[in-house]
Image (cartoon, coloured by chain):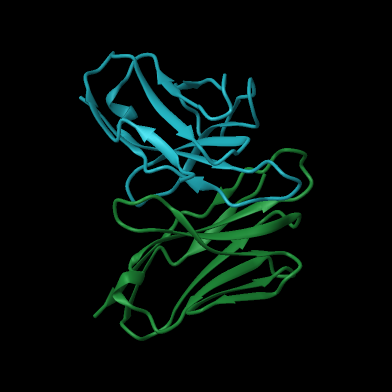
């Protein structure tokens, strides 16, 4: 099955700096890589995702890059703000298993943005 | 508004009690999931369903059971709660489709077993 490793487990940055969270996956058949943000006491919510036919995707201050050869993908947050403080989860899902779209999540990164 | 609803939001019960955590979605989704998560920690898939009358166990062994009699409803039952079941339980849903799709999460049920 798929195995997703996420680093770092905690990350502190000064407001305005950039934050980068990295994930690696094991199943070369994986083709969908979402990132979820979970604020304290709230439900996880999708913030950006990327599919294996794309190398990079941006949405305002967040971007995700995918390196299929190395089997890793990263979340980049620029100009961080205090409201970016949350736990971020990466995930991967393999292609081709009929009906078997179970996400495998990383263990999460707790991001703290210091004002 | 389309959403995922979970009740109760908080539950404190004694050891040995039978409980059912409710999950309903008005998203029109076929697939539904249950995750166990200690606050801010890793998400563990414990059950999932492709549609009505379909249920599967997830990666994390769980003493709970689920049923899927209606598309919109996916309740989780613990026959005899224990302190080790204390955790947050998140329900989620997604479209079936031909490709992977976003999972939408409910607000969660925080369970404490004394």
Q: Can residue B59 be seen in this view?
A: no
The chain drawn cyan is chain what?
Answer: B
Between A96 and B72, the residue placed more toward the observer is B72
Measuring from the top left, give residue B66's x and y in whole percent. 51, 22
Q: Can residue B101 be seen in this view?
A: yes
Taking A27 as reference, is A63 above or below it?
Answer: below
Which corner quadrant of the image does residue B59 belong to? top right
Between A9 and B111, the residue placed more toward the observer is B111
Residue drawn at point x = 43 percent, y = 48 percent: B42
Q: Quadrant of the C terminus of chain A?
A: bottom left
Residue that protrudes farthest toward the front in the picture: B1
Between B71 and A26, the residue placed more toward the observer is B71
Measuring from the top left, give residue A2's x and y in whole percent. 65, 49
Measuring from the top left, give residue B113's x and y in whole percent. 25, 26
Q: Is residue B61 left or right of residue B96?
A: left
Residue drawn at point x = 65 percent, y = 76 percent: A56
Residue drawn at point x = 44 percent, y = 57 percent: A108
Q: Is residue B6 left or right of residue A33?
A: left
The chain drawn green is chain what?
Answer: A
Taking A25 as reference, is B54 above or below it?
Answer: above
Measuring from the top left, give residue B39's x and y in whole percent. 32, 47
Q: Is residue B99 left or right of residue A6?
A: right
Q: Quadrant of the N terminus of chain A?
A: top right
Residue drawn at point x = 64 percent, y = 51 percent: B101
């Amino acid at each position: 099955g798929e195995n997703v490793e996420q680093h770092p487990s905690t990350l502190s940055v000064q407001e305005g700096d950039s934050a980068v969270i990295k994930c690696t996956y094991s199943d070369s058949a994986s083709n969908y890589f979402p990132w979820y943000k979970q604020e304290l006491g709230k439900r996880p919510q999708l913030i950006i995702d990327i599919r294996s036919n794309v190398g990079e995707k941006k949405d305002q201050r967040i971007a995700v890059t995918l390196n299929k050869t190395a089997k890793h993908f990263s979340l980049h947050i620029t100009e961080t703000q205090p409201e970016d403080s949350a736990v971020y989860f990466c995930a991967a899902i393999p292609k081709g298993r009929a009906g078997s779209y179970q996400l495998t999540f990383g263990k999460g990164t707790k991001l703290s943005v210091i004002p | 508004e389309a959403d995922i609803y979970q009740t109760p939001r908080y539950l404190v019960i004694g050891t040995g009690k039978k409980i059912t955590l409710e999950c309903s979605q008005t998203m029109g989704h076929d697939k539904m999931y249950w995750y166990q998560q200690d606050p801010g920690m890793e998400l563990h898939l414990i059950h999932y369903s492709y549609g009505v009358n379909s249920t599967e166990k997830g990666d994390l062994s769980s003493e709970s059971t689920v049923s899927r009699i209606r598309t919109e409803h996916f309740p989780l039952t613990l026959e005899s709660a224990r302190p080790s079941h204390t955790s947050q339980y998140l329900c989620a849903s997604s479209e079936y489709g031909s490709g992977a799709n976003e999972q939408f999460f409910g607000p969660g049920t925080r369970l404490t077993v004394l």
